Image (tube, helix red, strand yellow):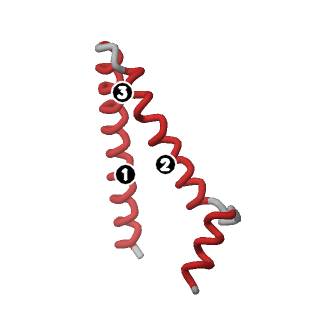
Amino acid sequence: MEQYLNFMLIRFGLIAGGVVVLAPLVFAIALAFKRRGRLDEVRRYADPVVKAGLRAAARRLGDGRSRTSRSRRQDDWR
């Protein structure tokens, strides 16, 4: 049990450390684009990607009652 708790603590530390490193990196990239005047261009390209990712996450985390996900699951079993 102690080994499992140590593993979970290390896992949490790695994830938290990754978030701490990733957040300033994303901020610095956004700041660089803003200074060069290209932030609007990046937003235009990133907006559809973010929306598609959010829809996919909602389907995955949802209860699966949407029409497309239910029909796909039924088709997979036939």
The residue located at (53%, 54%) in the rendering is 56
- What's the residue type where badge 2 is placed? Gly
| Of pointers 1 and 2, the one earlier in the residue sequence | 1
Give how far across and how far down residue 48 sits, in percent: 48, 39
Residue behind mark 1 = 15
Q: Tag 2's secondary structure?
A: helix
- What's the residue type where badge 3 is placed? Phe
Q: How many marks?
A: 3
Q: Quadrant of the N terminus?
A: bottom left
- The disc placed on residue 69 is none
Give how far across and how far down residue 6 sits, in percent: 35, 65
Residue behind mark 3 = 27
Comparing labels 3 and 1, the label whose residue is closer to the camera: 3
Comparing labels 1 and 2, the label whose residue is closer to the camera: 2
- What's the residue type where badge 1 is placed? Ile
Q: Tag 3's secondary structure?
A: helix
Image check: 9 left or right of 59?
left
Q: Tag 1's secondary structure?
A: helix
Residue behind mark 2 = 53
Disc 3 and disc 1: Cα gap in Å? 18 Å
Residue 63 in which image quadrant: bottom right
The residue located at (35%, 25%) in the rendering is 30
